[in-house]
Amino acid sequence: MTLTPQFLDELRARTSLSTLVGKTTKLQKAGREYKGCCPFHNEKTPSFYVNDAKGFYHCFGCSAHGDAIRWMTDQRGLPFMDAVKELAQAAGLELPAMDRQSAEKAERAKGLHDVMADAAAWFAEQLGGIAGAEARALLDRRAITPETARVFGMGFAPDSRGKLKTALKTYGDPMLVEAGMLIQVEGKDPYDRFRGRLMIPIRDARGRTIAFGGRILNQGEPKYLNSPDTPLFDKGRTLYNLDRAAPASRKAGRVIVVEGYMDVIALAQAGIGEAVAPLGTALTEAQLERLWRMTDVPILCFDGDAAGQKAALRAAHRALPLLAPGRSLSFATLPAGQDPDDLVRARGAAGMEAVLREAEPLVQRLWASELAAEALDTPEQRAGLRQRLNEAAGTIADPSVRSEYQSEFRRRFDLQFARGPRPFVPFEKRAPFKKGAWKPPIAPVGAEAKAVGSAGIDRVLAKAVLAGLIRHPAEIARHVEILSSLRLVDGALGRLFEAVVDLALEDQALDSARLLTILARSGFDGVASDLLRADSMPYSFTMKIADPVIVRSDLDEAIAILIARPEVDAALGEATAAMQARFTDEAFERQVALVREKQALDVRLANLVQANEDARALGAEGD
């Protein structure tokens, strides 16, 4: 069918928006409009307005805005076509005619919906009868109340091969097989799929039963049995409890993904209604996309055992290619060996909320899992970690998010394995460089140290690091991955940087003199010579004579600062722009945190400069 703009305009005109919204949201007349507390975020003072004349709603608190169709998709969580169909039915408006094939498909689907509705009613009836005593006892043991069982439409399938078939015989075996309620085996009569199980209806976004999950009452396998895929049911695209969780998530501002039916039901009974579950499979891309339509950062709360945590990690990797600015996942870790059902029965909703408050972002879950994957004692093992992190970030399709993950993984790697900032130690507390009891007074901070920040840290420091690498080519191999990807300088200095790295990689036994000779033949004589006359540079690694241990330590620190500073500057620029565009506490706190991080980098660099100036002063006094 084709939905023309004229048809959609007519549909909106025939729909009283205030009546539609008023079914689930309390509204009060306010002049020509209606107002109430916004259903899309928690508020105490009404800032949500509905205007029937103009046909839209708007919240001045969270900027939620839309018409009748948007209300059905955003607040009710319906797919677009389902929203249009429901509104058209309520307005007495016929949908545009479908082609023959689509009409036949719709008619067949209608019949299958009837089958599933009648099956759900029959199972519920059996649960309340004599035969359902054992199933009711299971619900009692799981602390599921009769009211909760009713809300979720729970039922019981007798341990028989033909009772459901007989009860629904008017539909005929072919339709019952197509609906997944009977099993067809070649050469035998079809028989009931679900036998001797607690039955849990699976509903679509409109609340219609489309499939079932059946839990065995005692011991046995499989513990859970789901309907097969049918014209109504695609388990890779369906989330259990979506119909009830979608509106609940609008109010709560979150959606929680758990592993199983009983987890969802237990959470709902405890007052946490915004939970859904995949249906016996790993979380799929289609299910992730459906979750992101509900909230930007769904919370995955899988079981605390090894299998549950592996499932969470699989979901994390599956989500990576789909990430977008502002769209991610977070992960709540349950106590070992517990699932949400266990937790709320033991500690109630407060216990679950405590776990949810500690949910960690996707980047932390990936970092922690790779960090714990294997020992990291050798350079090869650490290189393996770096490679795995780069490969994970490389799967992200969005370039801006991919860049942020690469930067974040690099920052965490450097913090984990690189030497941290060397604390400034006053001269009188340091061990003397030469023998003797006399100690000079504390040297003041030199002009070079004070000018580091104002002179442009990237180019100044890049020049010093390059001079250090030319003096100490053996150090290049230890930082080859970072140096190979370095793009902080351009022009002659940048080309020289690349040449020095390439030459050192070709010949790792290269010393400074041979490196200079090769560079001179390649046309870099003047630039390289200027750098090596840079004993005025305030770093140990640029000096002709220096302690090798100090050189290595200071060069490590300088390279770490060289990499980190542009990332901090860029992030600070974005945070400042964001705060200027819209001042919020969060934006201000981020800007302050980045300013402090930038200042910390300045202190680290100043420590390198100051330590070398002190060493020079002491050398001069000793002379």
Image: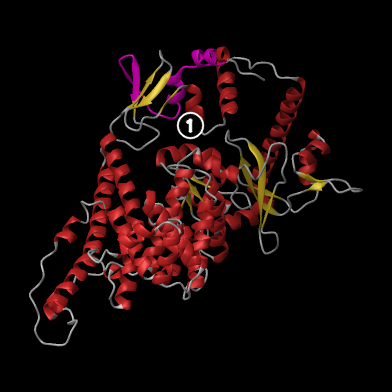
Is residue 585 visible in the rendered structure shown here? yes
Q: Position of residue 395 (x, y in %)?
A: 55, 50
Q: Give yes or no for residue 15 being in the magenta stretch.
A: yes
The magenta span reads 8-35
Circle 1: residue type: Asp
Front residue of 42 and 316 = 316
Front residue of 176 and 97 = 97
Residue 116 sits above or below residue 162 on the image? above
Residue name at image x 27 percent, y 42 percent: 576
Q: Position of residue 378 (x, y in %)?
A: 48, 75
Is residue 345 visible in the rendered structure shown here? no
Residue name at image x 70 percent, y 61 percent: 221
Give left or right: position of 437 versus 350: left
Residue that label 1 marks: 74
Where, quadrant-wise, is the N terminus in this rendering?
top right
Where, quadrant-wise, is the C terminus in this rendering?
bottom left
User: Could you say whether the residue bearing mark 1 is in a helix, strand or loop?
Assistant: helix
Residue 486 sits above or below residue 558 on the image? above
